[in-house]
Amino acid sequence: MNLLEMSYEEVVDVVKQMGLEKYRADQLLDWVYKKRVFTFEGMTNLSKEHRALFREKFTVKLPRLIEKRVSKIDKTTKFLYELEDGNTIESVLLFHEGYATACISTQVGCPIKCAFCATGQSGYVRNLTVAEIVGQVLAVENDSGRNIRNVVYMGMGEPFLNYDNVVKSIKILIHPKMKDMGVRRITVSTVGIPDKITRFADEGLDVRLAISLHAASNEKRDTIVPINRKYSIEEVLQAAKIYQEKTDRRITIEYILIREFNDFDEDARRLAKLLKDLKAYVNLIPVNATSASFERPSHWKMVRFKEILLENGIEAELRKEKGADIEAACGQLRLRRMQAKS
């Protein structure tokens, strides 16, 4: 069994069934999650007998790196990984002042099919397993030599359509005997699945929630985020209010700015009105064009949009673009590789 698929309690149960003391499980997990040693031969504080027993019972399988691209602009690093079944996923390492963030995937492809997103263009295959989600964090650390301080579930896929595996992976990453990440250093980004948002509020996980809204009217959102036809903006924001009431956490609203589509002053004022009863922070993102259909607004237009939000009491920031020279947006590298093979 893949150790990365297992919760702390599951590992302890198996170790006890092997007739070993609980602390042997702690030693094993320390080697994997904190020391990043993925072969049992390298776990030197375990006897040869114990290493042999663990080798018979467990495996530690990380996704295989098949392509790595590093930005010359800001060192943003994009990883294309191959899974055991031959499918590929992407992870991205983002550098900030004093720390690094891993942006990880939750699905192979994505069923949401947002019009501007390369991942949606590549189609949907399946959900990732817990081990494939957790394994990305360890693989990025291993392949970059960097310690990951923050994790964002904002890569390929919709996290809340792989709900159980995402929640279990978070619990593994934050467990003190495993990766031991600070829970407030984890962000889950969703396009907005209302029932899953409210369910997530009851998990007792103090993680950050980001909602990809991208439009201030249902008419516009319907055209770029097809799932809006099932879950309207009003339903999504009502779920966000429930989440906030239960967790007392500020919610991030992701808003892709598209030239002459959702970048008008009226859009900014409408967005501010929608968010007036929500403690929210708006992350404005110039579209990373994946086709000729979408262009980013001029800089002054984006600044103007931000200023209107601020004038209406909504905290907002224009996200600094990272990795523009390496196609760092979700799914671009995988899509390019798929197109080259076809």
Image (cartoon, rainbow, N blue to C red):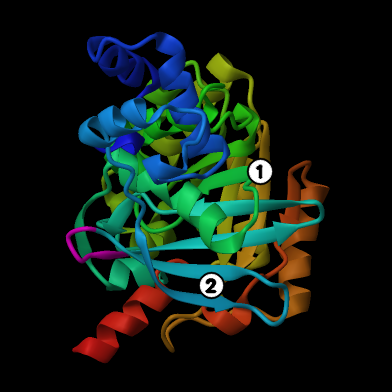
Q: Is 248 above or below relative to 115?
A: above
- Residue that carries the numbered disc 1 in the rendered image: 149
Query: Which residue appears at 32% of the width and 38% of the height?
Result: 130
Q: Which residues are magenta?
A: 84-88
Q: How many numbered markers are drawn?
A: 2
Secondary structure predominantly adopted by residues drawn in magenta:
loop
Q: Nearer the viewer, mark 2 or mark 1?
A: 1
Q: Nearer the viewer, residue 202 or 229?
A: 202
| Occupied quadrant, residue 208 | top right
| Three-letter residue code for mark 1 | Arg
Q: Is residue 205 left or right of residue 182?
A: left
In percent of width and height, residue 309 lies at: 74, 51
Q: Quadrant of the C terminus?
A: bottom left
Crowd class of label 2 (few under 14; some 14 to 19; many from 20; radius 10 Å): many
Residue 322 percent location from the top left of the image: 66, 70
Q: Nearer the viewer, residue 14 or 281?
A: 14
Which residue is denoted by mark 2 in the rendering?
Answer: 328
The question of residue 32 being in magenta is answered with no
What x and y, as percent, mark residue 78?
52, 70
Q: In this view of the protein, can residue 63 be seen by the observer?
A: yes
The amino acid type, in three-letter code, at marker 2 is Ala
**As drawn, 163 above or below 117:** above
Q: Quadrant of residue 210?
A: top right
